[in-house]
Each structure stands twice: as structure tokens, then as C-alpha cells.
Image (spheres, helix red, strand yellow):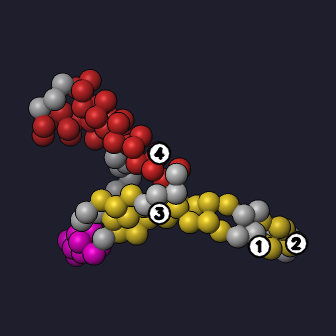
Amino acid sequence: MSDRTLTRMDLSEAVFREVGLSRNESADLVESVLKHMSDALVKGESVKISSFGTFNVRTKTARIGRNPKTGQEVPIEPRRVLTFRPSHLMKDRVDAGNKR
């Protein structure tokens, strides 16, 4: 497992190298795509990227949880959570990487 994290700067640098836009244009493009994705998720829409996966916002209802240290019951408020479901192609690619 790698300790490396792919960042926005890495993505914009990849766009710069692959597409040939300037570094500033590449950074703007990456920011624009991420903003469109996050805006759609805030509105409750799904974001599906073919061969990658689907991001969804799911609503969780209120429930009673338990503090693991004390065992005391604690109410958990209803909330919206972000979920990601990888595509079968992505699962296969990750699995293939495990076999190296």
C-alpha cells in the first residue's frame, strides 16, 4: 500500500501534460470539474463517472448510538452522508493491482 496521495495539483499537472493546456488553465479545469461535482452532490444528485464509480448522498435517520469507551447511549442526529460505489471496471483494476 502506498503512502502517496493524489492531490488537486497532481490532477492539474496531469491535465497539463496530457491535454496541453497551460498550467493555470489546467488548474482551472480541475477546479471547475470538482466544483460541478460537489454542487451536484449538495443538491442531492448522483455523480456517475463511467468506468470509475458513482458518488451518492444518502440520508441517515436519527438513531441511538453507544459511546464505545463508556457504554453510554447517545442520540445521533439525522444527517446526510457521502457514499462512493466503484464500478466493476475499477474494482477489477484495483484487484489486478493486488496481484503484483
> Real-space Cα distance between discs 1 and 4?
28 Å
Q: Which residue is mark 1?
A: 63
Q: Which comes sooner in the sequence, label 3 or label 1?
A: 3
Residue 94 picture location, percent across and down: 28, 69
Q: Quadrant of the C terminus?
A: bottom left
Label 1 crowd bin: few (<14), some (14–19), many (20+), radius 10 Å: few
Query: What amino acid type should be assigned to the residue bearing mark 3?
Result: Asn
Label 4 crowd bin: few (<14), some (14–19), many (20+), radius 10 Å: few
Q: Which residue is mark 2?
A: 72
Q: Are marks 2 and 3 in contact (CB under 8 Å)?
A: no
Residue 67 picture location, percent across and down: 80, 69
Residue 30 picture location, percent across and down: 31, 38
Q: Helix, strand or loop at disc 1?
A: strand
72 displayed left or right of 52: right
Q: Helix, strand or loop at disc 3?
A: strand
Would you identify the image quadrant in which residue 35 lies? top left
Where residue 39 is drawn, which disc sits there? 4
> Real-space Cα distance between discs 2 and 3?
32 Å
Along the line of sight, the residue nearer the viewer: 40 or 70: 40
Q: Which residue is mark 3?
A: 56
